[in-house]
């Protein structure tokens, strides 16, 4: 099928419209990519600001509780030992305990003079 001169006249008058359409499509794609990039960036910033829900630790929390329970028992035993030493006033070697050597008025008075 041959192109008649009248068809060429019609095509040449529409070339500028086709060019504008193609430029608008390219700009639209670039604009669309910029919008998507901004949305992705916003989502990642929101994700970084969020506090994540804790995952199930399984037996790990029980182990921590066991450790704290053992620590409490040790502290209780140490406290009982100190109390028995304070009651005796002396250690097994015949020396005075650390608690007997402290100044009784230490830490009970506040000096407010400058």
Image: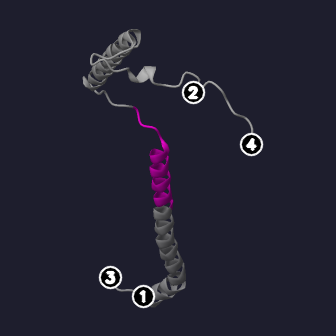
- Asked whether 101 or 3 is in front, the reply is 101
Q: Residues within 10 Å of mark 3 (few under 14, many from 20)?
A: few
Q: CA distance from mark 2 to mark 3?
A: 114 Å
Query: Which structural element holds mark 4?
Result: loop
Quadrant of the image containing the N terminus: bottom left
Q: Nearer the viewer, mark 4 or mark 1?
A: 4
Q: Main secondary structure of the magenta part?
A: helix
Q: Earlier in the sequence, mark 4 or mark 1?
A: 1
Q: Nearer the viewer, mark 1 or mark 2?
A: 2
Residue 113 % position (x, y) = 75, 38
Q: Is residue 73 above or below residue 52?
A: above
- The circle drawn on residue 114 is 4
Residue 65 % position (x, y) = 32, 20
Q: Earlier in the sequence, mark 2 or mark 3?
A: 3
Q: CA distance from mark 4 to mark 1?
A: 109 Å
Q: Is residue 48 magenta?
A: yes
Q: Earlier in the sequence, mark 1 or mark 2?
A: 1
- The circle drawn on residue 43 is none
- The circle drawn on residue 106 is 2
Q: Which residues are magenta?
A: 35-53
Q: Is residue 53 above or below residue 58?
A: below
- Asked whether 57 or 10 is in front, the reply is 57
Residue 55 % position (x, y) = 33, 30
> Which residue is tagged 1?
4
Q: Earlier in the sequence, mark 4 or mark 2?
A: 2
The answer to whether mark 1 and mark 3 are in CB contact below 8 A is no
The answer to whether mark 4 and mark 3 are in CB contact below 8 A is no
């Amino acid at each position: 099928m041959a192109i008649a001169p009248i068809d060429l006249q019609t095509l040449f008058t529409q070339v500028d419209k086709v060019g504008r359409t193609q430029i608008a499509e390219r700009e639209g794609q670039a604009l669309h990519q910029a919008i998507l990039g901004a949305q992705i960036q916003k989502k990642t910033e929101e994700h970084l600001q969020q506090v994540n829900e804790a995952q199930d630790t399984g037996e790990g929390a029980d182990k921590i509780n066991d450790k704290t329970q053992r620590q409490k028992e040790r502290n209780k035993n140490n406290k009982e030992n100190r109390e028995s030493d304070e009651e005796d006033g002396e250690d097994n070697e015949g020396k005075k305990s650390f608690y007997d050597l402290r100044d009784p008025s230490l830490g009970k008075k506040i000096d407010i003079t400058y």
